[in-house]
């Protein structure tokens, strides 16, 4: 990882979580879709006496975008001083293994939100992720994707997404992070932009806790090496 990426990665993360005293985070794991071929791990790190805000990071929603999954995996190692960090690095595990956007029998997880308990595999996965958002009262969802271009250059191209819940605190949290990271990005086209149009039905942005109500901050492209894309996803989104 390049030095600037590491610096961005750490400082941006601290903008989500207030820096206080020493780390007393507790760690534990869950499995969603347990007992099925779609099962995938959830990694949770929390400071019990100060568990707010909660941030959920998802990667691997699309199996053909491995840098997002790798970046989410990196985020598991970040030390937190306050709040709760929930990471699902491999949302669509089978698709990642196949390096395909999804598999026909699964369908597109990013069109399946908020999901259904007894629906298609994609709907069941989305239902589980929605459950995490609600159970932990997540303030910000960071959905790590890859895109063919930066959103600044092509509005149809959506890469990493920062999705605050619709309340002033969550909005302020996301805006603080975006403001910081955009000051560190020299090239205008790499900066995060606010998407003001409505999200695609069934996407994470569509239903990440507040259907139709999440604002989106987007960046990303797929024109670099896998390592560069992973670094960028990590420092852009976290
Ligand atoms: Zn994607």
Image: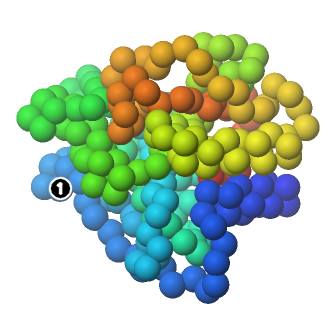
Name the residue nearer the viewer: 10 or 55.
Answer: 55
Q: Give the residue at x 57% y 82%.
A: 23
Residue with the mark numbered 1:
34
Percent across and percent down for residue 120 are 16, 29
Residue 15 appears anywhere in the view: yes
Q: Give the residue at x 35% y 39%.
A: 209
Percent across and percent down for residue 186 are 91, 37
How packed mark 1 is, by other alpha carbons closer than 10 Å (few <14, some 14-19, many 20 or more), is: few
Percent across and percent down for residue 111 are 34, 23
Q: Is residue 227 left or right of residue 160?
A: right
Q: Give the residue at x 39% y 64%.
A: 43
Name the residue nearer the viewer: 83 or 4.
Answer: 83
The answer to which quarter of the image holds residue 107 is top left
Q: Is residue 27 left or right of residue 195?
A: left
Q: How many marks?
A: 1
Q: As displayed, is residue 182 above or below residue 202?
A: below
Which color mode does the image show?
rainbow
Percent across and percent down for residue 17 are 60, 63
Q: As displayed, is residue 154 above or below residue 215?
A: above
Residue 89 appears anywhere in the view: no
Q: Is residue 103 left or right of residue 80?
A: left
Name the residue nearer the viewer: 172 or 86.
Answer: 172
Give the farthest residue toward the front: 168
The answer to which quarter of the image holds residue 187 is top right
């Amino acid at each position: 990882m390049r030095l600037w990426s590491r610096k961005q990665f750490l400082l941006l993360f601290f903008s989500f979580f207030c820096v206080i005293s020493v780390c007393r985070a507790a760690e534990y794991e869950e499995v969603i879709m347990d007992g099925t071929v779609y099962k995938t791990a959830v990694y949770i790190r929390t400071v019990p006496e100060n568990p707010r805000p909660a941030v959920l990071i998802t990667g691997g929603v699309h199996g053909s975008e491995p840098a997002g999954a790798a970046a989410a995996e990196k985020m598991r190692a970040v030390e937190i001083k306050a709040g709760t960090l929930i990471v699902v690095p491999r949302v669509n595990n089978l698709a990642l293994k196949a390096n395909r956007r999804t598999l026909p029998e699964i369908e597109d997880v990013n069109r399946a939100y908020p999901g259904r308990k007894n629906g298609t595999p994609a709907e069941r996965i989305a239902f589980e992720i929605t459950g995490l958002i609600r159970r932990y009262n997540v303030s910000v969802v960071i959905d790590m994707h890859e895109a063919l271009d930066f959103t600044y250059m092509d509005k149809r191209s959506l890469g990493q997404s920062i999705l605050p819940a619709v309340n002033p605190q969550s909005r302020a949290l996301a805006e603080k992070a975006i403001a910081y990271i955009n000051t560190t990005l020299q090239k205008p086209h790499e900066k995060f932009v606010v998407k003001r149009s409505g999200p695609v039905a069934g996407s994470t942005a569509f239903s990440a806790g507040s259907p139709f109500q999440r604002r989106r901050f987007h960046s990303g492209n797929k024109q670099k090496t896998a390592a560069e894309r992973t670094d960028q996803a990590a420092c852009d989104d976290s």
